[in-house]
Image (tube, coloured by chain):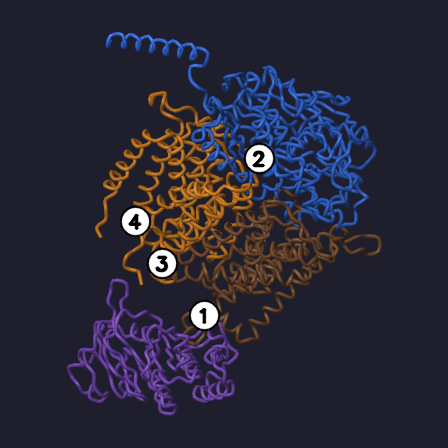
Amino acid sequence: MQIFINTILVGLSSGAIYSLMSLALVLVWRSTRVVNFAAAGQAILSTYIGYEAMSSMHNYWLSLPVAILAGAGISALVEALVMRPLAKRSKGTPVEAIAPVIATLGVLGGIRSLAGLIWGNNFIQYTSPLSSKGYTIGQTTIPFSPQNAAIVIGAVVVMAMFAAIFKFTRLGLALRAASFQPEISRLAGVRVDRIRTIGWAFAGAAGAVAGALVTPTSYLSPNSLDLLLVSGFVAAVIGGLESLIGAVVGGVVLGLGFAFILQYIGTSVTFSAAFIILVIVLLIRPQGIFGRRSGREA
Amino acid sequence: MTLKVEQLHVQHGAITAIEDLTFTINEGELVTIIGSNGAGKTTLLRALSGLLPVSAGSASWKGESILGKRPEDLVRRGIVHVSEGKAVIPELTVAENLELGGIWRKDKSDVAAATAEVLELFPRLGERLKQGADTLSGGERQMLAIGRSIIARPQLLLLDEPSLGLAPLIIEQIFAAIDALRHRLGLTVVLVEQNAMSALSIADRGIIINLGRVVGSGSAQALLNDPALRSAYLGY
Amino acid sequence: MKHKSPIRRLAILLFIGALLIAASGRVDQLRAYQGAQVAIFAIAISAIVLLTGYSGQISLGHGALMAVGGYAAVLSRTHWNIPYPLSFIIGSAVAGVFGFLLGIAAARLKGPYLAGTTLALAVGLPSLANQFHVLGGEQGLTFDAGNVPSWLGSDFSQYRWFFVVTVIAAIAVFWLLRNLLSTRYGRRWRAIRSNPTAAALAGINVGRAKVLAFTLSSTVAGLAGSLFAMLLGLVAPLAFTLTLSFTLVTGAVLAGVSNLGGSIVGAVVLVSIPELSNAAASHFGGSDKVTANLPGVITSVLLIATVLFIPNGPKMPKLSRQ
Amino acid sequence: MFVQRRTKGGIFAAAVVAAAALVASALPAHAETGVTSSTIKLGVTLPLTGAAAPGYNKIPAAMKAYFDYVNANGGVNGRQIKLVVKDDAYSPSQTLSVTNDLILKDKVFALVGTLGTANNEATTRLVNSQGVPRLFVNTGFSGFADMKKYPTTFPLFPSYATEAKIMGKYLSDNFAGHKVALIYQDDDFGMDALKGFSTAGTTFVAKIPYAALSQADPSVIGKWVTSIVASGADTVVMFGVTSATGALAGGLYKAGLIGKVQLILGSVGSDGTTLKGLLGPLAPALAGSIAASFLPSPSDATDEYITQFKAINTQYNAGATFDNNVLVGMNTAMMTVQALRAAGMSPTRASLIKAIETKGSTWASAAFSPLLYSAKSHVGYTGYWFGKLGLDGNAVSVDGPGKYTLYTTDSGSGAVVKAAAARPAMPAKGLPKN
């Protein structure tokens, strides 16, 4: 019983971690219909900037907003300097759907190399004042720590905040309209270019939250978020790509599925587990848990 | 105080879609552009609304050039283009589609007023405000597209094939609505139509283009009565 | 445009191949190796072009399909001691069967969902080698390509021989694919790509055509994997990483995606960009951090610039410029 | 006049030819690849970028620093050593590509310290066909000692199987009656270890495999801890890479198990400095852990090898933090210098290999273990000592500072022998005179 509960807690806490990256990917998908593999790179860079901020200010909480602003800025730059010109140039060509994917991979590689160039290919600690020691209930220490709680709160806050922006604000309406029908949106007076950049900036901010909250549970290196990118993308697909709630639910489904497979089936399928979970979900719902049936193709 | 198009030239890759097009439309006029498929009608509207780059010539609205401007800026100057094919966003609700029409406007009370006018004109939209636009019929979608454009308080309305794919009864309703709107709001309207009969029935004038050039023009009445034009472009 | 006959195509390809093979005697071993790399990449990229450019499906998992082909080739050669050209055919066939099964699942998935599934496959599949003893674990299994045929003479280097083998394979693949694409299958795929709904209305079984495309693409990827095993002399999980899958899609984009001939250009660019970056980086020098990471920065900048400025691949159709 | 001059010229020419012939007879028929009258060029491949890079990327700079030091002191028989470093990002196909460059373009004399099992496997065909010596490969895979398959390859590190067998002996000597759990990487690295433990007859209450690099995922760490708790283990053997050791420490801390579970770490994952970077303020969580090593502790100020290497590091390596990776780099470089010296005034690839086979076992190196090089064996080190990690993350021998007890054995079924550690003295100023 204890093992079962622990497995659930492990699944939930890692699910929250996947959710944060998943949110960053869904936010970009919603605003420009691009799977942004650069998200991990952007989050790495913003986390390094957060690390620098903490080194000079000696306060994790003050470094958080720095990292988030940096993440938003980096993401906006990537959109304005690379993705927007590319979208215009590749429009109507056979590569329209996948050239952006390649561009984001290029950005990912570039940022990783840049981070290595500046900070070196080493492990760096970016620590939070929150304990990573699990809460103690009676005699037992459960595998859920204050830092995990911060991650869960972070995921929920990011999800709720952006869901509210999308649902209740004019900016949110413009973001949705611009992603579904850019041309009609422009004809309705939406400044689509600017709106897309804002969409990317939001995603960058979400990614920065992911990087800054997750890194204290492990370490920082140019490649330290690589695995999270894969889990985050799989979680986003499970959730249906469109929906922010789906991103979080997808993360939790993946986290729980992963924890249970590791515990009860074995570690021999560690890297295949994501594939197995994804196939099961997509066999039942090819458009993901919260995806629209009419969702357009990438 | 007019829409003035002079020697307009639009290149579509290697194909010249519009070649040396010149015409003038006076304020408050409803002019229909008639021509066969591929004559360059849609290209013309897309060029005027800033969706397509123009290779030569000039176009001005109220004395100011409208070329080289982005569509979202032209909307702010009162030039609103309702593009071909029931230009609504199916993923949004009816209410959201309407809200989008006034999203850039500062005067929120007037947006509310304009929205009320649209709902009065098209009561069926009012009944379906919370529904997704993808649940609407073709005619309702066209109403929604036109309604959204009205909330922007346009001066010059560019309408592309509002009758496309609609049943005759619905077409009649749509054209009646367009006619009512232009009179009530004092709109200048450029109406591109294949369905020349219906278009001419509400238009003041018609301009006939073919292969990117103006090949004829005249009052709606005169065009309807010109047998040569009738057989060549009106199909009867 | 007049269609070239299959025979004429073959003649042209054979002529190009003969030229290449003759030229390979005039370059050093290093270039011969890179030539073989280009040929293998061209085959693997054409697999993606077939899938993405013709049937409109996206795969981020072709590295895993190459792994299937490579492992099958190595195992069949080691355990049955068959000649290695035959092991290539077995490698292709096994990858094809695998691709058929995957294709059944893939046919009902749209763009990003398929991308996610194939990505998860690329991450998961190669690591399975550690679970089954027969697959050799982390250090992998060696592929014994034997010696260069003796009638070629003693100064015919092994890398030059690999170049000849891979060029012949590439010619065979290009010829077969080219002919296939001008049959009704090719037309069906193009129809599906440009408008799946219209294709379905026109009576094309979209699902079946997509599964066929996936199967064929996997077969070609399996061949590339077998040749890769030969060139590398081994199969190991680390040789078929996610990076390889990403590299192949990158090559396909550089190839213009819907252009088989572009595969070769894409492959050349893939092989030459790292070389250019290293050459450029070596001019700067500096600390270890710099020398290790500068090539990566330059590679990424070149890649982004290439995608940005030649988004439609090498053969940009002149008509569609706006 | 004219005739005379011609005659004189003729004599001069004849003299030159004769002299040249004399010189030529003293030299091999042709100069060896990578060797000139003033230089010897060597190559190394290892991950400088990518997930596997941290830690390992310090090795080449340390090797270069030692070579620079030797070069500044006259080089090897008058030749300066040049090291060409290539990044393979830990991908075997990249290893082959850059090794092609090293052998066919840069034309190195030998490869030194190339890292990774699959990576070395991928270049084996090339290395064998070109007869390139591949010295002191950086992997514990026992297979590379197979002289038939890898005639020019010399492993240096003890094999993982050896390490596990020795650890098993240590456990039965010191932890009899304890409940021991094992965490291992479920690839060849771990399989070799399982083999060693099974030869030693060690029994575990739980064996927890994990896939390489999966330690970056929180669920995997959660699973380790859950399994440890469920098994009731009071002792945990970690046979993984450094980032896995770090992740385990984090997981145990999270579960409140620090101080309740005795950790025993394999040599691959117990470098104190790297662990400190990984764990930051959590680093003291590892204090009290027992670690197996074959090299002395990088922090042992009483060790003559360490103090000498540290001095070289300060002067030639921009004072990089002296850790196990720097030590490995310097030690490998010092072995290489001795091999090159022993290969003769006109070293050839054949003479280099012969030199190691005939004299390699006598050379000075930092490890306490003997070297088993001979004409019949390419096995390098075979022994380990055990240390306890302090609060600073550095290991101190369990027998007290500077007192090393060495356990030696082979990769097969041979017995584990316990002895006081002994090794050749550090050459004066760290410059071999073999």
- Chain whose colour in the figure is purple: B
Question: What residue is shown with label 3?
Answer: A93
Q: Colour of chain A?
A: brown
Task: Read off the chain for label 3.
Answer: A
Question: What residue is shown with label 2?
Answer: D60
Q: Is residue D421 above or below residue D97?
A: above
Q: Examine the rendering and report whether any part of residue C208 can be seen.
A: no
The residue type indicated by label 3 comes to: Thr
Q: Colour of chain D?
A: blue
Instruction: Please state if A140 lies on the left or on the right of C299 as rendered.
Output: right
Percent position of residue C291, x then y: 51, 42
Q: Are marks 1 and 3 in contact (CB under 8 Å)?
A: no
Secondary structure under tag 2 reads: helix
Along the viewing direction, whichever of B157 and C179 lies nearer the viewer: B157
Secondary structure under tag 3 reads: loop
The residue type indicated by label 2 comes to: Pro
Residue drawn 45% across the image and 79% down it: B101
